[in-house]
Image: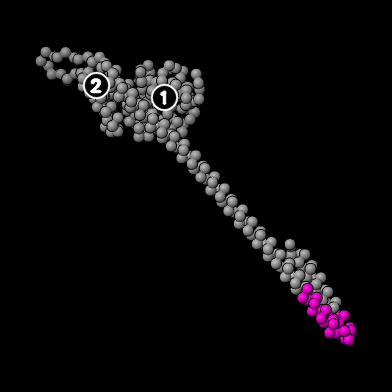
Amino acid sequence: MTARPIARGRKAGWAGVAWLSIAALGTPGCYTAQMTLVQSGLDSLRTQVDMMSARDSVSAQLIADTQRDLAEQKDLLLATRATATSTSRESAESLDRMEGKLDDIMARFRIVSERQAPPRAADPVTPPDTSGRSAKPAATGANSTQLYDQATTDLTQGRYAMALTGYRDYLKRFSETDLADNAQYGAGECFFAQARFDSALVEYKQVGARWASGDRAPAALYKVGLCQERLGRKDEAKQTFEDLVKRFPQSGEAQLARDRIGVKL
């Protein structure tokens, strides 16, 4: 109920009281009866005013309660939305970490498997110099393989700084051997395992640049795509995976790339 109807009611009530008062003054003989009537009118008017005030109070309280309920529902809705968003984000981050861990484990498994494979042909050994002149000792297949194996052991056991040093030493001394592309790939693995995807990306790209047809090329290209994904470069990652499928369609990494881009070929 608004203030205007209440004001009209009060005005009408007071007008009635005024009329009764005038009538009582004009007729002295009816003074007592008319005063009683005036008192009755005042009581009736007071009752109406009290009733209207009570109704206004109830309406105001109802409005206040409704507003409070709406505010509580709004807060609940916002809290629910925030929780859902947070849960979704945490799930996505957890999935990314799990995928990265799986990739790391698979890479280490491949490296260990290669170490157990039949040994490759030994690097050529320079015949001893019988001329009496001093010469630097030649690198043998044994010490090159030993250096590579030690770096790989460090990688698989989480000693990434030592592994990286070993791989780079190998590349400096034995860059023309069959294991050189593996050593370059291993350098990328050292960074990838530490989530240093920008540095890992540089190392993996070197595999494709220097040994484009080597046995490590598909795995390195796949890891390039993964690094691009982790760095938020989604379009570049998709292009890399498509290139991998095109260049090495029969490789295991090509199937992984198809899964990531949603292409069933």
Taking the magenta stretch, the answer to whether it contains residue 33 is yes
Q: Amino acid at mark 1?
A: Tyr
Q: Indicate which disc, 2 or 1, sits on the residue closer to the N terminus.
A: 2
- Front residue of this view, candidates 171 and 145: 145
- Residue at image position (60%, 57%) is 68
Q: Amino acid at mark 2?
A: Thr
Residue 50 falls in image quadrant: bottom right
Looking at the image, which residue sits at the far left?
Answer: 132
**Local secondary structure at mark 1:** helix
Residue matched to label 1: 222
Which quadrant does the N terminus fall into? Answer: bottom right
What percent of the width, then of the height, locates residue 137? 17, 20
Decide: few, some or many residues near mark 2? Use Cα within 10 Å; few <14, some 14-19, many ≥20. Answer: many
Residue 6 falls in image quadrant: bottom right
Query: What residue range appears in magenta?
Result: 21-44
Looking at the image, which residue sits at the far bottom?
Answer: 29
Residue 249 falls in image quadrant: top left
Q: In this rendering, does residue 176 appear at all?
A: no
- Front residue of this view, candidates 202 and 21: 21
Q: Is residue 28 left or right of residue 98?
A: right
Decide: few, some or many residues near mark 1? Use Cα within 10 Å; few <14, some 14-19, many ≥20. Answer: many
What percent of the width, then of the height, locates residue 242? 47, 22
Q: Which mark is residue 127?
A: none
Q: What coloring was used for the rendering?
A: one colour
**Local secondary structure at mark 2:** helix
Q: Is residue 192 left or right of residue 28?
A: left
Residue matched to label 2: 145
Characterize the magenta stretch by its predominant secondary structure: helix
Q: In this rendering, does residue 110 appear at all?
A: yes
- Residue at image position (26%, 28%) is 153
Disc 2 versus disc 1: distance between alpha carbons? 26 Å
Taking the magenta stretch, the answer to whether it contains residue 163 is no
